[in-house]
Amino acid sequence: MTNETHDATRRTFLKTSSLSAAGLTVLSHKTFAQSEKNDAIQLGIIGIGGRGSSLLDTFLKKQGAKFVAVCDVYVKRRKRAAEKAGLNPDDPKVCFADYRELLKRDDIDAVIIATPDHWHSTIAIDALNAGKDVYLEKPMTKTVEQAKQVHETVQKTGRVLQVGSQTTSSDQWWKVKDVMQKGMIGKLIMSQGSYHRNSKEGEWNWDIDPNAGPKGTGDDYIDWDMWLGPAPKREWSADRFFRFRKFWDYSGGIATDLFYHVMAPFNICWPEPQFPYKVASSGGIYVFKDSREVPDTFAFMAEYPGEHQVVLSSSMANDTHIPGLIRGHEATIMIVEHGQFEGRTDHITVTAQRPFEKEFKAKWGDTVIKIPTEPREDHYDNFLRCVRTREKPNLDSGTAYRAMVTIAMSVESFRSGKILYFDEKNEKVLDTPPKA
């Protein structure tokens, strides 16, 4: 393919990536709640790499749900997924290379999206407009504007969208929310957390299949142009395809991959989800001097209009966490002592600040209150139930949007070297403080 032909093909794809241009019917699908409650929720999955394969395995175990279609640009992945789901990998009506063809099936109730980050918003918006409910793997999107567009589409279509930060369905965050709503900690001052890992080979350096690519034949073929989609045009790179989180075109690195698991829970803990006012970040590639563009060590501080801040730290070269907690003027909530935000803890602890111990004990019974957590339905069951009931899921688009703004701004702050501000009234990122 010549460069001229490649460019023309790419322009055509970008022009036809929306539903209307692709000839898909907008809002044609039924509301699942109108079906018999005993009907199985019919699922399609788009993107079946490492995370997508894990989600496929998880949802295959869920009662009342079944896969009827799979989609991936890599032939081997989609065939393997089809076989696992009990589908015919050679049937073009169930095994797709182009997600838009999957969305044309009006018998699909919901789709699971687990593509690289740069595709999240486009596919989610198209799926919502096609009348599908959506389980959208974290991060919600890659940019602030994309998150806003997804949220607005959810509001417009009335579809159910759950963002896939599974830890947000754990009980500890909801116990913290209750503590804060009761006023136990007084004025909110700071939320702090971390996400640390370590390895010799470097984070995201996943295995590469040397036979796979756009020149591969049979199961080894990858539609590279389709995979790039809205990202900048580049020549084939196995490193970029198999290790996409190392590159800015497709990911925000630590911030989008891991800090989303911290910011989404905090937005659940607080009395209400919030946009930041100001975000500043720093870091660098301190250890893993490979082809990566994203930092291996990263931290940010965000300030919020309610006069409180978030401080997060992370390194992919040291796995020692800091405790996850929320500081108030009158008390502190220890949420995850070990600092690992993913997974469930069996309790949270509220400890009075020394100047307020007497008043705290009189009101709450002691100066240290240990509150046990309880089992809850997991994130996937919560999504499936909401598909049936039309309730708001645990990590709905509004909460997820607010978490995404802070995350995306931290990436932009790092890359630009600037302190950034958010104009909540106009929902825009600014280089200077918004006018009052």
Image (cartoon, rainbow, N blue to C red):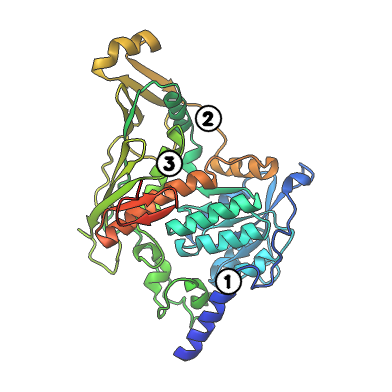
What percent of the width, then of the height, locates residue 328?
A: 32, 27
Q: Viewed as shown, does residue 221 lie left or right of 295?
A: right
User: Would residue 214 be found to the left or right of residue 101 on screen?
Assistant: left
Above or below — where is 81 with respect to 159? below
Q: Which residue is mark 3?
A: 274
Q: Is residue 306 left or right of residue 377?
A: left
Residue holding disc 1: 17
For the residue labelled by badge 3, is the local secondary structure a helix, a strand or a loop? Answer: loop
Give the distance between the C-alpha atoms of the residues marked 2 and 1, in whole angstroms: 42 Å
Q: Residue at x 34, y 31 (%)?
A: 326
Q: Nearer the viewer, mark 2 or mark 3?
A: 3
**Viewer-proximal residue among 339 and 277:** 277
The x, y position of residue 219, in whole percent, is 55, 75
Q: Determine whether 194 is above or below 147 in the image.
A: above
Query: Alpha-carbon neighbours of circle 1 within 10 Å: few (<14), some, or many (≥20)?
Result: some
**Nearer to the camera, 6 or 220:** 6
Select label 3 or label 1 by which is in front.
Answer: 3
